[in-house]
Image (spheres, helix red, strand yellow):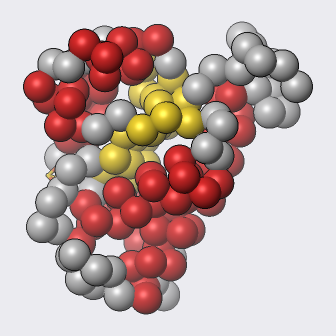
Amino acid sequence: MNDCRRKVVIVPCSGIGKTYGTVSREAAYEVIEDMRPADTQLVALSLLVLGDEDARAAVAGNPAVTIDGCKLACATKMVEESGGTVAQDFAVLDAYRRHRQFKPQGIAELNEGGQKLAHAMAEEVAAVVDDLSGDGGKDA
Ligand code: SF4
């Protein structure tokens, strides 16, 4: 344990009004608020789009994990355009292919399948955070 561990930036896409976008945000919040609060920080895609200096600095100075709702990969593209490094990109559609039993529905409120899919993604993201933040790994 040391105090020099890097914070991993988590950037969910902003698929407002889309079920997969909601899943991406729910997964991100679960990692940041419940699973790895000490090792992660949320950067809102909307701030990167607006060119917010703090948001750009956060992605430029830390490894980023993106969670996109669909193939357009808005979060991944925006992190790269903001000078950041995407250490791992997740896509809700891919996660659904791995967890077909969790069919997401709903937008403002996810159905049970959507909540379970978000949870499954959050666990995958948390495992990547552990690798990136130094738990069990060494700085390259
Ligand atoms: S990645 Fe897809 S769902 Fe997410 S904001 Fe972009 S277009 Fe919308």
Q: Tell me the residue at 51%/23% (across/down).
A: 63
Vertical order, 73 against 134 (above or below): below
**Does residue 24 lie above or below 47 as drawn?**
below
Q: Is residue 20 left or right of residue 66?
A: left
Relative side of 31 to 43, left or right: right
Quarter of the image where the C terminus is located: top right
Residue beneath the point at 63% across and 20% down: 6
- Let me know if residue 98 appears in the view: no
Image location (x, y in percent) of residue 101: 48, 87
Where residue 66 sits, quadrant-wise, is top left
| Residue in the image at 65% along x and 29% along y | 132
Image label count? 0
Residue that appears at 20% across and 19% down: 52
* Residue 82 % position (x, y): 25, 17
Quarter of the image for residue 10 reads: top left
Position of the N terminus, as image quadrant, is: top right
Residue 62 in sight here: yes
Is 65 drawn above or below residue 94 in the view shown?
above
**For residue 41, side relative to residue 1 (left or right):** left
Q: In terms of image quadrants, where is residue 109?
A: bottom left
Position of residue 124 relative to residue 3, above or below, is below
The residue lying furthest to the right in this view is 1
Residue 124, given in percent of the width and then of the height, sits at: 60, 55
Give how far across and how far down residue 138 sits, in percent: 80, 19
Nearer to me, 105 or 6 = 6
